[in-house]
Amino acid sequence: WNEPLPEGRARGVALYYAHGGWAAQVAEISIKDGKKIVVHRVFCAVDCGFVINPDTVIAQVEGGIAFGLGTALKDEITIDHGHAQQQGFGDYPLLTMAEMPEIEVFLMPSREPPTGAGECGVPPIAPAVANAVHARSGRRLRSLQRV
């Protein structure tokens, strides 16, 4: 993180607290063809008290980032006459492995009692990406609604 960014990239930061745990995320993005957001890298520092099983916490945070990123960039349910138009994975777009960024999770050492870690990976990813988009383009994203 101490090296200059590659040409055309920017970083954004967001912080979240829930269930006794903190998560701070940095998203590194570029914008393809002036409109498609590409997330290249995500760093997440988590303070959720004493960690009993680090591999499980890291997996939960990585999964939360994937879920939140998909929601921010791609997932969409459309309603027509009160009915969801998507009926399964065939017509509900999810992030593919090729679209996933490199993710690094750092667990803060702590002697505090264990707290929640499963939820804290999801909420900060959309704001971190939105802040990176602002840093790159000057445009503020204030909604996940598709335009």
Image: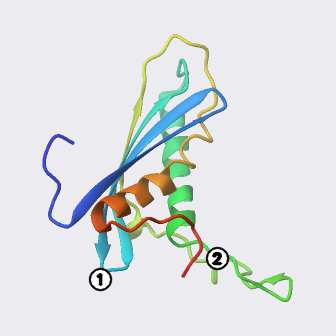
Is the Cβ of the residue at disc 1 closer than 8 Å to that at disc 2?
A: no
For residue 66, side relative to residue 83 (left or right) = left
Type of amino acid at the residue the image marks with label 1: Asp
Could you tell me which secondary element the residue under label 2 belongs to?
loop
Q: Residue furthest bottom?
A: 81
**57 relative to 29, above or below:** above
What's the CA distance linking mark 1 and mark 2? 27 Å
Q: Which residue is mark 1?
A: 33
- Which badge, 1 or 2, is on the more N-terminal residue? 1
For residue 81, side relative to residue 94 (left or right) = right
Q: Nearer the viewer, residue 29 or 56?
A: 29
Residue found 56% across the figure and 78% down from its top = 146
Residue 147: % across, % down: 54, 82
Q: Which residue is mark 2?
A: 89
Quadrant that contains the N terminus: top left
Q: Which is closer to the viewer, label 1 or label 2?
A: 1
**10 relative to 92, above or below:** above
Could you tell me which secondary element the residue under label 1 belongs to?
loop
Label 2 Cα crowd, 10 Å radius (few <14 / some 14-19 / many 20+): few
Quadrant assignment, res 115 = top right
Quadrant assignment, res 135 = bottom left
Residue 44: % across, % down: 41, 40
